[in-house]
Amino acid sequence: MRAIAVGRGETDPTVVEIDEPEPAEGEALIRTLRVGIDGTDHEVIGSNHGGYPEGEDFQVLGHEAIGVVEDPNGTDLEAGQLVVPTVRRPPGGDAFGSGAEPNEYFERNEPDMAPAGEYVERGIAGAHGYMAEYFTSEPRYLVPVPDEFAEIGFLVEPISNSEKAFDLAEASRSTFEWDPESAIVLGNGPLGLLTLAMLDDRGFDRHYCLGRRDRPDPTIDIIEELGATYVDSRETPVDELPGAEEPMDFVYEATGYAPHAFQTIDALAPNGVGVLLGIPGEWEFEIDGGALHRDFVLENKALLGSVNSHVPHFEAAVETLAGMPEWFTDAIVTHVFDPEDVDEAFETGDDRIKVVVEFDDL
Ligand code: NAP
Ligand code: BGC
Ligand code: ZN
């Protein structure tokens, strides 16, 4: 079968021919429909994040997938059911993440909270991903989605990352009466825009989104269509938001631009919370540590990191995606490529938001 993979030491993904996977006992065979590409995939290709499956000289990419059950293979799944796979698997399985016993984090359904060494990530770190005509998985790592999700279901995974981030942030403010009004999303990539579209339902009144682009730009159009205010970081740096716009009750970082992690402390209103999702490479810079520390303490601010997500976040994401307007999901998915057009699929450009590789349709 065809798969999209990157060879060790290489930076350009190519189409490779690999054996169709045989589902082991307790696993189903899934036919892949669509797989989305995000900033993390580009970091993986550039060897800035993740790593190859042990003993393999290539890695099949892709972690944002939607597929259809081809062979339930004795599991409770039904042939024809649409499913979205989760990303993490216990370490110690084969190159496709199969065959390892769940460790304590997986047993309590919190693999997203596991430290390094206690998981692999399909398509990212230590296991092959979903950019192949078929993949196999135990049903416990597959989230059923409605039939209408055949074209957009790959968005469940990135939305689930934000469901978790919101949960963590809200939990950190749950011991007092927190009545947030203003929120900013840092980053107008696909994760940032999907998250911006989630702010209404999370109870924020005033929404902002940070980018570094000139108009006309499709992401600025979407930001404004969502009723949010576009902030250009070249004119208004994040630490100047309280003066130029307003102090933010909530900051969601999705740029991977490391200075934003610390500028977020300045951007926050008293009692506010910032959550960091970007995954920068090595990056040294100076900060005014004393002032940040003091402000952080005296104004009861919180700053959290959040990575990955698991089944409950995926289930919440299914609801969230179902409630997103069609104009929005249409505008987000800017490019759909066949696997053969792999070179084009992994190009970058300001006209692209979410790029998708389509292996099959229903
Ligand atoms: P992306 O496509 O790379 O988007 C990042 C966006 O941030 C880009 O649109 C970029 O603008 C903008 N940006 C970067 N620096 C900026 C600056 N200084 N000022 C204003 N805008 C800036 O990535 P993504 O898929 O949306 O994901 C965002 C980040 O989250 C990535 O680092 C990704 O690895 C990470 N991520 C983490 C998790 C998690 O679980 N923690 C989950 C998914 C993704 P331009 O396009 O104009 O350059
Ligand atoms: C993926 C997460 C993963 C994270 C770190 C994100 O792009 O969506 O599932 O945990 O990268 O590798
Ligand atoms: Zn991702």
Image (tube, rainbow, N blue to C red):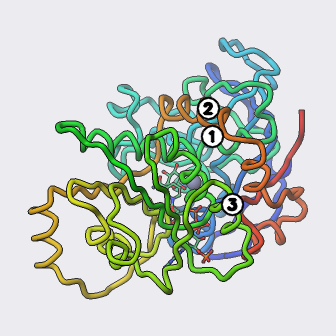
The residue lying at 30 percent from left, 43 percent from top is 179
- Foreground residue, 127 or 22? 127
Q: Residue at x 67, y 62 (%)?
A: 58
The residue lying toward the viewer, choosing from 232 and 252, is 232
Which residue is identified by label 2? 318
Task: Report the mark closest to the observer, 1 or 3.
Answer: 3
User: Nearer the observer, disc 3 or disc 2?
Assistant: 3
Helix, strand, or loop for circle 2?
helix
Q: Position of residue 182 (x, y in %)?
A: 39, 55
What is the three-letter code of the residue carrying label 3? Ile
Confirm or deny contact between disc 2 and disc 1 (CB under 8 A): yes
**Badge 3 is on which residue?**
222
Q: Amino acid at mark 1?
A: Val
**Residue 135's x, y, as percent?**
72, 38
The answer to whether any part of residue 284 appears in the image is yes
Rendering quadrant holding ligand 1: bottom right
Element class at badge 3: helix
**Looking at the picture, which amino acid does disc 2 mark?**
Val
**Mark 3 or mark 1, which is nearer the start of the sequence?**
1
Q: Which residue is mark 1?
A: 156
Q: Residues within 10 Å of mark 1 (few under 14, many from 20)?
A: many
Callout 3: 10 Å neighbours few (<14), some, many (20+)? many
